[in-house]
């Protein structure tokens, strides 16, 4: 049976590790986001890993050692000594974030720190989040439970709806 696992890899080598794992016939995934980079003479859209140093592999238990032998792979992410299995739904969430391309830098008005919000439009519709930062820009935080990681996604305020504790 195939399971998703998260592995630690060399930072800034996520795409290369995914390619090497594909060459070994291993299904690997590193979610990417596009950001506009500005140099003194030009601007260019560049892809960056959404989770720096992380790659996800969908493998049988018998393929675990094969993954570790791939150049650039350090180890499996473990909690209490056990490799963390990632749910398919969490990989789907990462893919939705990647496909939606949300990275809007406008401020979210009328929200406070720790407000619970629901995304009402787009590929992430129905997901719940928490406002975790109110500085230059605001973020909606999506908690990936089995990874014990948070992903901050910049979203336009018009696609968010406040949720009160009674409706959660």
Image: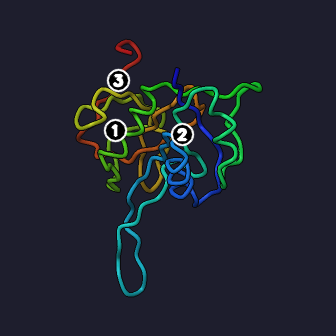
> Disc number at residue 11?
none
Quadrant of the image for the C terminus?
A: top left
Residue 11 is left or right of residue 87, and the answer is right
Q: CA distance from mark 1 to mark 2?
A: 15 Å
Where residue 90 sits: x, y (%)?
A: 45, 29
* Label 2 Cα crowd, 10 Å radius (few <14 / some 14-19 / many 20+): many
Secondary structure under badge 1? helix
Circle 2 or circle 3, nearest the eye: 2
Residue 100 placed where, x, y %?
29, 45
Q: Nearer the viewer, mark 1 or mark 3?
A: 1
Q: Which residue is mark 3?
A: 163
Q: Nearer the viewer, residue 96 or 37?
A: 96
Structural distance between the alpha carbons of marks 2 and 3: 32 Å
**Is the Cβ of the residue at disc 1 closer than 8 Å to that at disc 3?**
no
Frontmost residue, 157 versus 63: 63
> SS of the residue at dot 2?
strand
Picture residue at 42% right of the left edge, 31% below the top:
129
Counting from the top left corner in percent of width and height, residue 134 is at 46, 47
Q: Nearer the viewer, mark 1 or mark 2?
A: 2
First in sequence, mark 1 or 2: give its number. 2
Residue highlighted by disc 2: 56
The disc at residue 96 is: 1
**Residue 131 horizontal/vertical position (percent):** 44, 37
Q: Secondary structure at mark 3?
A: strand
Callout 1–callout 2 Cβ contact below 8 Å:
no
Q: Counting residues from the N terminus, which is met first, the one under dot 1 or under dot 3?
A: 1
Q: Name the N-terminal-most of marks 2 and 3.
A: 2
């Amino acid at each position: 049976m195939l399971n998703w696992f998260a592995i630690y890899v060399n930072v800034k080598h996520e795409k290369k590790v995914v390619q090497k794992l594909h060459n070994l016939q291993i299904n690997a995934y590193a979610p990417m986001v596009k950001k506009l980079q500005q140099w003194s003479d030009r601007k260019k859209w560049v892809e960056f890993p959404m989770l720096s140093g992380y790659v996800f592999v969908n493998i049988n238990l018998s393929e675990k050692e094969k993954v570790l032998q791939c150049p650039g792979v350090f180890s499996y992410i473990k909690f209490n000594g056990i490799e963390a299995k990632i749910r398919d739904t969490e990989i789907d969430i990462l893919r939705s974030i990647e496909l939606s391309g949300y990275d809007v830098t406008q401020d979210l008005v009328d929200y406070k720190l720790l407000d619970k919000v629901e995304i009402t439009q787009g590929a992430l519709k129905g997901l719940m989040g928490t406002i975790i930062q109110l500085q230059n820009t605001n973020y909606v935080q999506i908690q990936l439970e089995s990874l014990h990681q948070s992903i901050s996604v910049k979203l336009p305020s018009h696609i968010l709806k406040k949720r009160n504790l009674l409706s959660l």
